[in-house]
């Protein structure tokens, strides 16, 4: 299928199919700009001008997993490890509410020292002391743990699938299982979490067909928040010598996802800003509607090294909030004043 027909299929809300996803995912030059413009127009109609801010708290860089791309992998002996205390996490959350955030994202490596009970206590206390929505991104746990955290007050959960290609997944996750990751996502959905997932782009062995299959899988899952990150080769990982992903790849996918998921939340990620000083702004103009300023204490922030050359490592939470707000306003967009919960009553995809 040619690009114009593929774009028409997307705009007509055709069921996602490889035949029209691939031409969009391979678009370049003027076609890519046409795709981005179409996605931005759809974002304006379905999600409005608001950009919702999620304050990101990276509270531990310990991880039990050995993912081949991640700087937090357990075999990275050069990384200085840290854990924020319960009191530190609560202080950060209270400050986030003071600054005007409506959501915080509690994220860590798969650190089992933050067990079911301890995390439930943290979630409950944040809910008791603030009016924040809570997104968790803590990896794979069992159903009982997810259920306890949901009862404690967690609203959303982000667990990126990274890829649905079994061969690529196995290379990325030598001590993990694709079906287990999918099972966790199904459990989260069943428990009523607002469901977040997503993939990396620019992975070794990945092509437009494999990404198209990822998009189709996420559509069938009914994913409501979709995080996209370009692949960065980290020097302390087995994939250190691979070529990294590009901003164009990430923007192209953001635009395609907005067309396929008109009512889902899509962030302009820090990783995009790490590739280009205005990468996040470009993502907001390609269909994204979320930004996630880092509010982790500065002394810990530099140690949460998922990938190298990460931006915004030295700014405190107040400066980060002011910076991100000014960037959004410069695009003639608005700061979202609500929680930015998912839109389920109007969603059609």
Image (tube, rainbow, N blue to C red):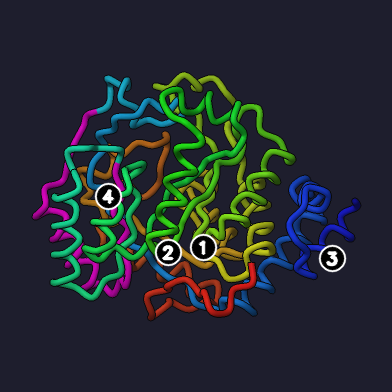
Residue closest to the eye, 322 or 235: 235
| Whole-number angstrom distance, CA of label 2 to CA of label 1 | 6 Å
**Do residues under tags 3 and 2 come within 8 Å of each other at their CB atoms?**
no
Tag 2 near tag 1, CB within 8 Å: yes
Q: Is residue 85 magenta?
A: yes
Q: Which of the 4 image quarters holds residue 300?
A: top left
Mark 4 lies on residue: 144
- Find the distance from the CA under tag 1 to the CA under tag 4: 22 Å
Residue 163, above or below 343? above
Give x and y (percent) for residue 166: 59, 30
Q: Is residue 138 left or right of residue 255?
A: left
The answer to which of marks 3 and 2 sits earlier in the sequence is: 3
Left or right for 101, reference 335: left
Under circle 2, the secondary element is: strand
Mark 4 or 3: the one toward you: 4
Measured Cα–Cα span from mark 2 to mark 4: 17 Å
Determine whether the residue tagged by mark 4 lies in a helix, strand or loop.
helix
Magenta span of residues? 80-108
Q: Position of residue 251 (x, y in %)?
A: 63, 53
The numbered mark at residue 224 is 1
Q: Residues within 10 Å of mark 3 (few under 14, many from 20)?
A: few
Secondary structure type for disc 3:
helix
According to the picture, the residue beneath numbered tag 2 turns out to be 194
Do the CB atoms of the residues marked 1 and 3 lie less than 8 Å apart? no
Q: Which residue is mark 3?
A: 8
């Amino acid at each position: 299928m040619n690009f114009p027909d593929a774009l028409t299929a997307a705009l007509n809300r055709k069921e996602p199919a490889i035949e029209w996803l691939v031409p969009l995912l391979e678009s370049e030059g003027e076609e890519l700009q046409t795709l981005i413009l179409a996605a931005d127009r759809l974002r304006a109609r379905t999600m409005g001008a608001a950009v919702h801010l999620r304050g990101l708290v990276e509270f531990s860089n310990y991880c039990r997993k050995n993912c081949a791309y991640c700087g937090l992998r357990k075999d990275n002996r050069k990384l200085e490890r840290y854990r924020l205390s319960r009191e530190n996490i609560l202080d950060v959350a209270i400050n986030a509410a003071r600054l005007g955030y409506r959501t915080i994202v509690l994220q860590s490596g798969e650190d089992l020292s933050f067990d079911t009970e301890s995390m439930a206590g943290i979630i409950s206390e944040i809910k008791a002391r603030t009016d924040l929505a809570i997104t968790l991104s803590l990896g794979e746990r069992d159903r009982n743990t997810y259920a306890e955290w949901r009862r404690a007050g967690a609203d959303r959960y982000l667990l990126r699938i990274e890829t649905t290609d079994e061969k690529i997944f196995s290379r990325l996750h030598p001590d993990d299982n694709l079906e287990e990751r999918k099972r966790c996502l199904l459990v989260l959905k069943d428990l009523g979490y607002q469901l977040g997932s997503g993939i990396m782009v620019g992975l070794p062995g990945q092509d437009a067909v494999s990404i198209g299959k990822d998009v189709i899988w996420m559509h069938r899952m009914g994913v409501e928040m979709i995080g996209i990150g370009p692949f960065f080769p980290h020097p302390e990982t087995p994939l250190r010598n691979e070529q990294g992903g590009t901003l164009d790849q990430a923007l192209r996918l953001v635009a395609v996802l907005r067309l396929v998921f008109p009512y889902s939340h899509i962030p302009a990620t820090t990783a995009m800003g790490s590739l280009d000083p205005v990468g996040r702004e470009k993502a907001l103009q390609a269909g994204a509607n979320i930004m996630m300023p880092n509010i982790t204490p500065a002394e810990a922030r530099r140690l949460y090294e998922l990938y190298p050359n990460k931006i915004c490592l030295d700014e405190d939470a107040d400066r980060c909030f002011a910076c991100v707000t000014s960037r959004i306003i410069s695009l003639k967009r608005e700061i979202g004043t609500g929680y930015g919960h998912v839109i389920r009553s109007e969603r059609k995809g």
